[in-house]
């Protein structure tokens, strides 16, 4: 009996020692993305996604549609609407923005704007992009939409337009966000709005890649300088980094949308609910490294193809010349032979009237039997609808047509 007890205690001691020394590892919830070389990208964050910006193709995903607290990566949408307002001519970078009592009262990350202080739109974008300033974000929301509430409506409408199915905004900052109050997003949705911002408004990189800068507060008390330090540590060392935005609260933990460009590849890596601030940067970098190491992009504008005129039913004339529109892009995650990509032209059944630039067909791309996508073919001229006299004229012409 004594011998049996000694054996049991010895076995228990040995087991505890092995566990402590790391001989037995308890499985953790880590997602592994296998690379072409057989190594893996280990993601401990609750959700993550990697997409290519020009094609929108998903290269890696982990719980991409899980609704989570986004914190300050909310401001990616805020910045998107700001740049849209600039493009639409509603505001200019040189316009002045007056800070309201409400905007100045924002807590969390801020640049300590004072009520009635004025700054330019350019400075406000700098504060939002570099320092994640909540006060600057609200001031810009009020400048564009009259109030933060009205601006949030625009944010949610834009999210809907982008196909962000797992997102709802309650504010423009991500401050004190809570899923139960209705403020949430997902890793894939964050990637979608990041893609919209970085691809359509690449000038954001002029702000989001700045490591340190200053602004000048101009108030009744005089002028004072305030230092800005970028919350995205990747801008200091990652090759090709173009942005984009960090976020963290006690509920959200640590989030990051990191964007970078190399050799024609525009990669967007989103990490949400990472356990600490270092891991969000490490795992986003790992995703970007994986994408650049294993992905290649193919682009084509239809060059070298001969386009027959498209037939327009009921039109005068009855055919129209066509041209390709835009650039077709596809991301390959392994080596590919460009010469084995097939391009086939297909025309639609088109009826007059037809406007110049309307789609009349498409180029279909495939590789080893797999459909990759299409590129539209559009008309080069207007085509009017034929009337009774046009048909009569055509009939008479055919009647008196003489052939040898």
Image: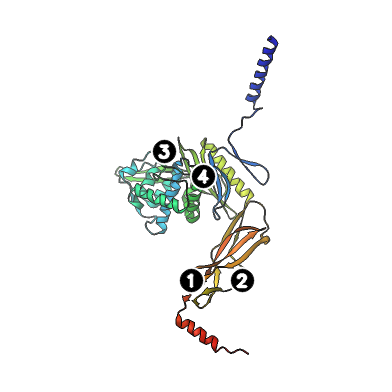
- Element carrying mark 2: loop
Residue holding disc 2: 306
Report the Cα–Cα distance between label 4 and label 2. 43 Å
Quarter placement of the C terminus = bottom right
Query: Do the CB atoms of the residues marked 4 and 1 lie less than 8 Å apart?
Result: no
Q: Secondary structure at mark 1?
A: loop
How many angstroms separate mark 4 from mark 1 (CA)?
40 Å
Q: Residue at x 52, y 70 (%)?
A: 350
Q: Which residue is mark 1?
A: 356
- Counting residues from the start of the chain, the first of labels 3 and 4 encountered is 4
Q: Residue 390: in sight, yes or no?
A: yes
Q: Quadrant of the N terminus?
A: top right
Residue 217 position within the rendered picture, expressed as x and y whole percent measured from the top left: 36, 45
Q: Earlier in the sequence, mark 4 or mark 2?
A: 4
Q: Residue at x 37, y 38 (%)?
A: 107
Q: Which sits earlier in the primary sequence, circle 1 or circle 3?
A: 3
Whole-Å distance between the Cαs marked 3 and 4?
Answer: 17 Å
Q: Secondary structure at mark 4?
A: loop
Cα–Cα gap, marks 1 and 2: 19 Å
Camera-nearest residue between 118 and 13: 13
* For marks 3 and 2 on the same chain, the one whose residue lies earlier in the sequence: 3
**Does 139 sit left or right of 336 as displayed?**
left
- Sequence order check, earlier mark of 1 and 2: 2
Figure check: 375 above or below 238: below
């Amino acid at each position: 009996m004594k011998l049996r007890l000694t054996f049991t205690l010895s076995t228990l001691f040995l087991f505890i020692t092995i566990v402590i020394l790391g001989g037995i590892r308890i499985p953790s919830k880590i997602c592994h993305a296998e690379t072409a070389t057989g190594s893996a990208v280990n993601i401990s964050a609750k959700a993550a996604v990697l997409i290519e910006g020009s094609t929108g193709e998903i290269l890696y995903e982990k719980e991409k549609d899980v609704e989570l607290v986004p914190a300050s990566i909310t401001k990616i949408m805020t910045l998107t609407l700001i740049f849209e307002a600039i493009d639409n001519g509603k505001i200019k970078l040189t316009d002045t923005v007056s800070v309201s009592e409400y905007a100045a009262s924002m807590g969390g990350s801020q640049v300590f704007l004072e009520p009635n202080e004025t700054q330019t739109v350019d400075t406000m974008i700098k504060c939002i992009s570099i320092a994640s300033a909540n006060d600057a974000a609200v001031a810009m929301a009020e400048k564009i939409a009259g109030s933060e509430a009205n601006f949030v409506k625009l944010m949610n409408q834009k999210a809907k337009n982008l196909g962000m199915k797992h997102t709802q905004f309650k504010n423009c900052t991500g401050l004190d966000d809570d899923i139960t109050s209705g403020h949430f997003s997902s890793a894939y949705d964050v990637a979608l709005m990041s893609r919209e911002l970085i691809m359509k408004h690449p000038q954001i990189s002029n702000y989001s890649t700045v490591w340190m800068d200053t602004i000048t507060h101009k108030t009744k008390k005089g002028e004072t300088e305030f230092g800005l330090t970028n919350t995205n540590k990747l801008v200091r060392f990652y090759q090709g980094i173009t942005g984009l935005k960090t976020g963290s609260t006690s509920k959200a933990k640590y989030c990051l949308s990191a964007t970078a460009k190399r050799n024609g590849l525009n990669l967007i890596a989103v990490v949400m609910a990472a356990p600490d601030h270092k891991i969000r940067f490490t795992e986003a970098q790992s995703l970007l490294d994986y994408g650049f190491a294993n992905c290649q992009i193919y682009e084509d504008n239809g060059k070298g193809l001969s386009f027959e005129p498209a037939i327009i039913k009921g039109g005068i004339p009855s055919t129209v010349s066509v041209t390709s529109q835009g650039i077709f892009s596809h991301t390959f995650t392994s080596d590919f032979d460009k010469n084995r990509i097939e391009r086939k032209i297909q025309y639609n059944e088109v009826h007059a009237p037809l406007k110049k630039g309307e789609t009349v067909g498409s180029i279909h791309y495939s590789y080893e039997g797999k459909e990759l996508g299409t590129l539209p073919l559009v008309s080069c001229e207007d085509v009017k609808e034929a009337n009774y006299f046009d048909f009569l004229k055509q009939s008479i012409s055919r009647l008196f047509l003489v052939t040898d």
